[in-house]
Image: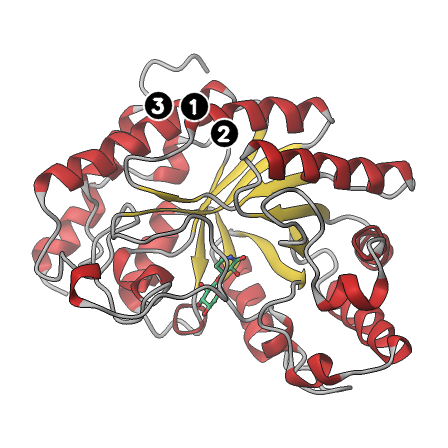
Amino acid sequence: MSNSADTSLQTTPSLKRTFQNDFMIGAALNTQQIMERDTNASRLVAQQFNAVTPENVMKAMIIHPQWNTYNFEWADKLIEYGKKNNLQINGHTLIWHSQMPAFARRLQSTDSFRLFFTDHITTVASRYRDKVYSWDVVNEALNEDGTMRRSPFFTKLGEDYVTEAFRLTQAAAPNTQLYYNDYNNERPAKRAGCIALINKIKAAGVRIDGVGIQGHWQVGKVPLKDIEESILQYSALGLKLAFTELDIEVLPRNFQGADVGQRMKADPSLNPYTSGLPDDVQQQLASDYEALFQLFLKHRDKIERVTFWGVNDGASWLNDWPVRGRTNYPLLFDRAFNPKPAFYKVIATRKGVYQ
Ligand code: XIL
């Protein structure tokens, strides 16, 4: 890293300080970053963020690779890193149909699948009891039309598995904030399904504290109206809101949402900005982020946390999804870890907001 980049980092405003009276500002960390092998990222995290989410290391495939075998090494390291840097940790995620361990996918009997489900939640949630601030207890249980996704959890355990997951997590980690997390759950049909799901959990007398809206959006198409309506409707249920995986993609694709199982074939026409982002797109990205943070600030009393899905453009999952090997620009910091125009627009939204 050059001296000039060093200097610019020291004089850069800080997201976490700018929004300290509003909501936490988080970033997703990959394994290299958790192991502190990426010094540029470590420096930026310490300066800019007060919350982190593990991008992968707490997912079942990694933390629970075999029946009766857990791999806590990286997750434990994350806890230590969080403590050292004053970062709140959001556990991601206990129950999700993607990135499941192969052994669990192969389980045939309902009894053994239920045993996996119960043991997984209880073991992981109790190990990190009082160490993680919140859990994404269940991730992506819904279809786009608001019906329940036919996941292995649904087909083997029935639709009450979501309530059951919250019940088990609550028992294992009574002081942790419990969230339901999904993508596109700001859109009307999926939102209605999400509200019905939340009401079921509550009707069973089980605690749920908040809703996570992932926030994988596309440049020029951020659904601000739906987002605002969702903030109002979810908070009317007494729940907190978190924007848990924010990024704004600038590259073309032919579908919306963030189903990690959905992919497109690589093609040069799908990777137009390998040598830099054109200025008009850069400006559009900046004004999208500006409008989004204006909305977040308007509802800052309802929003607990805004987490970016990655520290900087170079580390974004959108370089490899839904098409592998692209050059994407979805975050506030560029590949050299320098703040982009969108960063300064976001910082500027805070000016003039009454304390
Ligand atoms: C992504 C990670 O960023 C990738 O590294 C991994 O290969 C696939 O999963 N919604 C979620 C996240 O809830 O867990 C996903 O993370 C992105 C979409």
Location of the N terminus by quadrant is bottom left
Mark 3 lies within 8 Å of ligand 1 (Cβ measured): no
In the rendered image, residue 296, in percent from the top left (x then y), is placed at: 45, 27
For marks 2 and 1, give the one nearer the viewer: 2
CA distance separating discs 2 and 3: 19 Å
The answer to whether 120 is drawn above or below residue 304 in the figure is below
Residue with the mark numbered 1: 295
Q: Residue at x 31, y 19 (%)?
A: 351
**Is the residue marked by circle 1 packed among few (<14), some (14-19), or many (20+) residues within 10 Å?**
some
* Mark seen at residue 350: 3
Q: Nearer the viewer, residue 170 or 103?
A: 103
Kindly identify the amino acid type of the residue bearing the numbered disc 3. Answer: Arg
Q: Residue at x 28, y 35 (%)?
A: 220
Q: Nearer the viewer, residue 323 or 178?
A: 323
* Residue contact at pointers 2 and 1, CB within 8 angstroms: yes
If you read the primary sequence from the N terminus, does the residue marked by circle 1 or circle 3 appear first?
1
CA distance separating discs 1 and 3: 11 Å
* Mark seen at residue 227: 2
Mark 1: secondary structure: helix
Mark 2 lies within 8 Å of ligand 1 (Cβ measured): no
Kindly identify the amino acid type of the residue bearing the numbered disc 2. Answer: Ile
Kindly identify the amino acid type of the residue bearing the numbered disc 1. Answer: Leu
